[in-house]
Image (spheres, grey):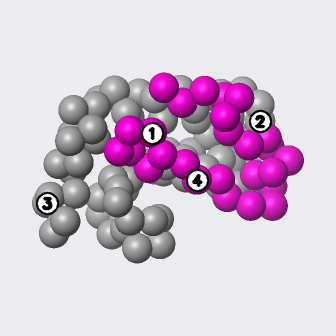
Amino acid sequence: MIEIKTIMSLAFLKKEHFSGSSQGMRYRLEKEGEEIRATVFPGPWCYEKTPREVMETEQFPFTEEGLSQAVAWLNEKYEEKKSEWEKGTITAAWGR
């Protein structure tokens, strides 16, 4: 489970994106305008090398509450495909 305390602060996100992974699911948070864009995608590759068609993205307000919502969404996305993330089967569709 991804916890808010493991995510960088809004002050950090104003200047840089934050990326991480949790048991096969990779994620990225970044400031886009006045919103936080959260993206999940399968490993093993980094964000820049992963095909966009296998990524899922959602937008949240650039506030502390929005950051909490983004973390909750990341955990929801993990739970939705938990067995696939853990087995690494999501990437099979695009040539792993």
Disc 3 marks which residue? 93
Q: Can residue 32 be seen in this view?
A: no
Q: Position of residue 56 (x, y in %)?
A: 38, 50
Disc 2 marks which residue? 63
The magenta stretch spans which residues?
1-26
Disc 1 marks which residue? 22
Q: For the residues marked 2 and 4, what is the alpha-carbon distance in whole angstroms?
A: 18 Å
Q: Where is residue 84 in the image (x, y as percent from the top left)?
A: 21, 39
Q: What residue is shown at x 14% (from left), y 58% (from top)?
A: 92
Instruction: Between label 1 and label 3, give the one nearer the viewer.
Output: 1
Q: What residue is shown at x 19% (from left), y 65% (from top)?
A: 96
**Which quadrant of the figure has residue 64?**
top right
Q: For the residues marked 1 and 2, what is the alpha-carbon distance in whole angstroms?
A: 23 Å
The amino acid type found where label 1 is placed reads: Ser
The amino acid type found where label 4 is placed reads: Ser
Q: For the residues marked 4 and 3, what is the alpha-carbon distance in whole angstroms?
A: 23 Å
Disc 4 marks which residue? 19
Q: Is residue 25 magenta?
A: yes
The amino acid type found where label 3 is placed reads: Ala
Q: How crowded is mark 4: few (under 14 residues within 10 Å), some or many (20 or more)?
A: some
Q: Position of residue 8 (x, y in %)?
A: 74, 43
Q: Earlier in the sequence, mark 1 or mark 3?
A: 1
Q: For the residues marked 3 and 2, what is the alpha-carbon distance in whole angstroms?
A: 36 Å
Question: Given contact means CB atoms under 8 Å apart, are the residues at marks 2 and 4 in contact?
Answer: no
